[in-house]
Amino acid sequence: MVVKVAINGYGTIGKSVADAVTLQDDMKIVGVSKTRPTFEAQIANSKGFPLYVLAGNEKKFESAGIKIKGTIDDMFKEAEIVVDCTPGDFGDQEKANYTKANLKAIFQGGEDHELTGTSFNALANYKEAWGKQFVRVVSCNTSGLIRTLFPLDRDIGIERVNAVMIRRAVDPRDSKKGPVNAIKPVLEIPSHHGPDVQTVMHNLKISTMAVAVPTTLMHVHSVIVDLKKEVKKEDVLKIWESTPRVMLIDGAKGLPSTAEVMEYARDLGHTRGDFNSIIVWRDGMNVVGKTLYYYQAIHQESDVIPENIDCIRSMMKTEADNTKSIQKTEKTMGIK
Ligand code: NAD
């Protein structure tokens, strides 16, 4: 079975999900949507993705020399599942459209958990999305926390987590927002990230705070975990070594910051300089008694992309085993 996938909102996340779908043999892109005739609409044309636009905007695209296939409503008729990549908070409006078109849809982390009632991470709760009509793939920060915490909770047991998110100010493409010369604490305490992790790891005790800093590259998390028993540093590293989409690196080998990590991604030939895996500094972690301390870096634009692919398989019931889906996604996307 080849699942017909539409991407609603061909922006930062939508473009990468479209490329990732194209790499799979069990799903294909039947359309992508744009609201404005930007360079991305031209890219969609050049990649051969059928392009659909908001009704009433057809002429704007045609006069910009961009080929369109129809309106977004026309695109819905071609698809079995929509990956909604519109900016956050469009969810209620779009969910009504998908319901009307009798379509399944995946929403992104900019939407609230309540929109779908099911939030997703391929390793932690693949089965919860099984056959569902609406599911949300959790945000980049939440995906990052779950990737490293879920295997620790499963294999050792977690008493409590305290974490601080040091967040990139904006994505590299964005010239409108900041901060440019400030460090901006998120004054809502605890931050929303802890409760968001609990939408997937329902019983985890976790509190989070966040600070936005003037960089576009990655987020960094500073995490303190009270474990249920004493373990050695090596025990934790061993768990992460065998965890998909977690990569251990050494600061001492020329990777002391997110700048070098992003250069490493480019040198490895990763598309768009992406790092789909969560980066954990091997030489930046320690265990003292039952307390684990570590730093991890999240490439915000790309860690959620493989999760969207696995989420399609669970919702469309095309692969029952999450390990098989994860492995297939990693092989096709070249994730190590
Ligand atoms: P973006 O602004 O880069 O792209 C959004 C796209 O949707 C644009 O192409 C825009 O033209 C289009 N769009 C706007 N209104 C639309 C409408 N009514 N119908 C169809 N298309 C419309 O946004 P993004 O960064 O890709 O974010 C998308 C979602 O992914 C958000 O929920 C966001 O919170 C989440 N997310 C973003 C990141 C990130 O780092 N950018 C990471 C994880 C999750």
Image (tube, rainbow, N blue to C red):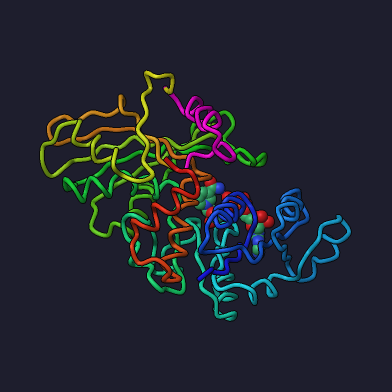
Left or right for 216, reference 243: right
Quarter of the figure with the C terminus? top left
Q: Residue furthest right?
A: 63
Q: What residue is drawn where x is 52% and y is 69%? A: 105
Q: What residue is drawn where x is 75% and y is 52%? A: 46
Q: Identify the main secondary structure in magenta.
A: helix
Tell me residue 163's x, y (percent).
32, 40
Tell me residue 284's x, y (percent).
31, 26
Q: What residue is drawn where x is 82% and y is 60%? A: 61
Q: Does the stretch in magenta take in 207? A: no
Tell me residue 112's x, y (percent).
45, 62
331 vs 41, nearest the viewer: 331
Left or right for 2, reference 59: left
Q: Which residues are magenta?
A: 256-276
- Classify residue 246 by image quadrant: top left
Q: Which quadrant of the render holds ligand 1?
A: bottom right
Q: What residue is drawn where x is 39% and y is 54%? A: 326
Above/below status of 181 relative to 326: above
